[in-house]
Structures are given as C-alpha cells and as structure tokens.
Amino acid sequence: MTTEARIQLTSSELGTLWMTYISTTARLIVYDFFKDKTIEPEAQNILTDYISEIQTIKNGIETIFNKEEAVIPIGFDEHDVIKESSTLFDDFFHIMFLRHMVKLSFGHNAVSSAMSYMKEVNDVLKLGYDISNKYYMATTNYLLGKGVLARPPYVTMPKQVEFIEDKNYMSGINLFSDKRSLNTIEVGYINEAIEDNILVMQLLTGFAQVAKESEVKKYFIEGKELAKKTITTLGSIFLKSDIQPTSTWAGKVTDSVQPPFSDKLMMYVNSLISTTALGFTALGTSFSMRNDLPIKLALISRDTFSYAKKGAKIMIAHRWMEEPPQMEDRNQLTKIKE
C-alpha cells in the first residue's frame, strides 16, 4: 500500500503567510488600543468585531506553521503597547485608520492568493480578503453617515461610446500646449492618493508627538512633510483641470505626548503604509495616459522609496526588523572546507 506524499508549504506561501502574520499582530495591538479609547458606541463595535475576526487569521497561520514545524514570527505583542497612555487620536481617526488599513489588505491578500497552492493557505488568505471587504464597507458607511468622508469628484454620465482619435490625447509635457481634461480613471487614482496622504499626514503628526527616539521623531516629521508635499502636487493637477481636490477630514490628533505604542510598532506601521503606497502609485502610473502624469507620479514614487529605505535602515539599526525566511545558501553549503 502506497501513501501519498505530504504536500508542504512552498517558498511563496511561506513568505506571504509570514508577512500576513507580522502585519496581523501589529494590527491587533493598534486596534485593541483604539477600541479601548473609542467613546462612540458604533465606532467601538466596529473595532471590537474586526479584532475578533482578524484574530482568526492569526490563529489560522499559527496552525499552518505548527503543522509545518516552522518557527512562528515574533511580530508584535503586549510589550509594544502602553494601555495606560492617553488617547492620541479621536474616534473618527480610529475608524479612518481601520478603513485605510483594510484597503491595504485588499491587494496583499489578492496577490498572495494568486501565489498559493495549498488549500489551507488559500482559505486563510481568502478569509483575510473577505474580512477586509466587509470592514471596508462598514467603515466607509460609518464615516459617510457621520459626514466626515468626502466622495470622489462627480462627473456627467457618458451618453455614447467614444474612441481615441487624436494622437495628442497622451500629450501633457509641453507647458505651452493645451492639456486634455483628466479621464475618470486618472481622477480615481489621484483622488485615492490625496485621501491616503491626508490620513498619513495626521498619523505621522501623532506619531511624531509621542516617539521616544529623536531619530524616529525626526523621521516621522519628514514623512509628514512628504505627505503634505504629495497632497499639494496632486491637488494642483486637479485644480488645473478645474476639479476640486478631496476635502476629507482625517480626524483629530490630540495634544497627548504619552506614547501608546513602541517606536518599533509605529515604525513598522509607517513602513507598511509607505511600501504599499509605492505599489499603488506604480499602478496609477500604468493607467495614466496623459504623459505628464507618469512623470509626476514617478517623482512621488522616488521620494517615497527614498523615505521608506531610510526607515528600513533605522529599523535595522535598532534591531526592530525581523528577517523573512531565507532560501538555502547553496554557495555556502557547497563551500569546500579547508
């Protein structure tokens, strides 16, 4: 009687689960603190329910790792939160931050699912996507209902199908030539980037207030200024097409200087947002057909990459960055011992 060979995790599955686990432990810590500091019952219920559901993601990954006899990452735990600290943000920011983070999870879970082969892995990643989708709608509806989330610009509905005939459709670099108005695809990506950077500006304002290490405090201030610069650059593109930039209110930062989170956790959250922004900007660039837009978006990507790289160096210097699982070093293993 033959027994079927046991299927083990592939390198891509191990990598995506590892990233998901680190991210999930960070989110659990942050949202649990936000939940305890949230006053409005409906907002608190959203956070409470979300925490309960993403805990199943963490448990599912631990089960797979234990089955594979793979070491479970440290991630983040109770050592990275000071629960006695005063609240750093108001209720609206707590929900806006959750909305932003579940948006980041969409892409990660979708791409990771496409790199999975084992049913157990795909189940965990699909559950992560489903939870993100559920709470994206829950947070969006809550914020719209409170009147603090601006919808993207409206447009007159098209009445007939049009085809691009003018070769100048893609022009935009010449300062003295007329630029066509933005199309709705371009507006969508620019508006999303403006909205995200408004939230990041508020987030890093708060983080800068409470960071312990002076180097980290300066880094957060630099990130806040980069977010403001990005908002200005993208907002000017809208204004030149007579489009009102989004005016979403991203919540309020309190005057607290008591750190609710470790510098390590705050640096990780910022790193997660920065690296994801690079991918989103690249996607927006690929769909932009007016040739001045990719140039401006590429400059934003360059600045974001430089900023993220600087943050990684700070995290490595402080031993705050866990190393992802590595492939075997065949050169080292086959090295002749003298």
Image: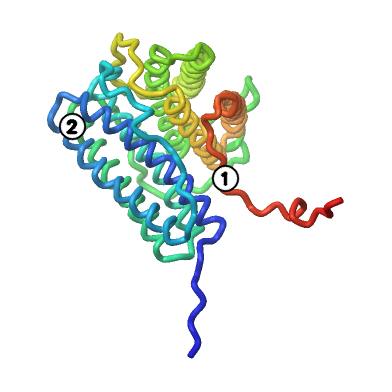
Q: Is residue 283 left or right of residue 63?
A: right
Q: Which residue is mark 2?
A: 44
Label 1 sits on what residue type?
Glu
Q: Earlier in the sequence, mark 2 or mark 1?
A: 2
Element type at marker 1?
loop
Element type at marker 2?
helix
Q: Residue at x 33, y 54 (%)?
A: 127
Q: Is residue 13 left or right of residue 63?
A: right
**Mark seen at residue 71:** none
Marks 2 and 1, how far apart in space? 53 Å
Q: Residue at x 50, y 70 (%)?
A: 7
Percent x, y of residue 5: 51, 76
- Residue 258 visible in the shown view: yes
- Residue 154 visible in the shown view: no
Q: Is residue 62 left or right of residue 299?
A: left
Give the answer, above or below, for where 159 lies relative to 170. Answer: below
Give the answer, above or below, for where 216 lies relative to 40. Answer: above
Q: Residue at x 47, y 36 (%)?
A: 186
Give the answer, above or below, for where 325 lies relative to 294. Answer: below
Label 2 sits on what residue type?
Gln
Percent x, y of residue 307: 57, 24
| Label 2 packing within 10 angstroms: few (<14), some (14-19), many (20+) | many
Q: Nearer the viewer, mark 2 or mark 1?
A: 2
Q: Colour scheme of this structure image?
A: rainbow
Percent x, y of residue 281: 52, 35
**Mark seen at residue 165:** 1
> Which residue ends up furthest to the front in the rendered image?
338
> Which residue ends up furthest to the right in the rendered image?
338
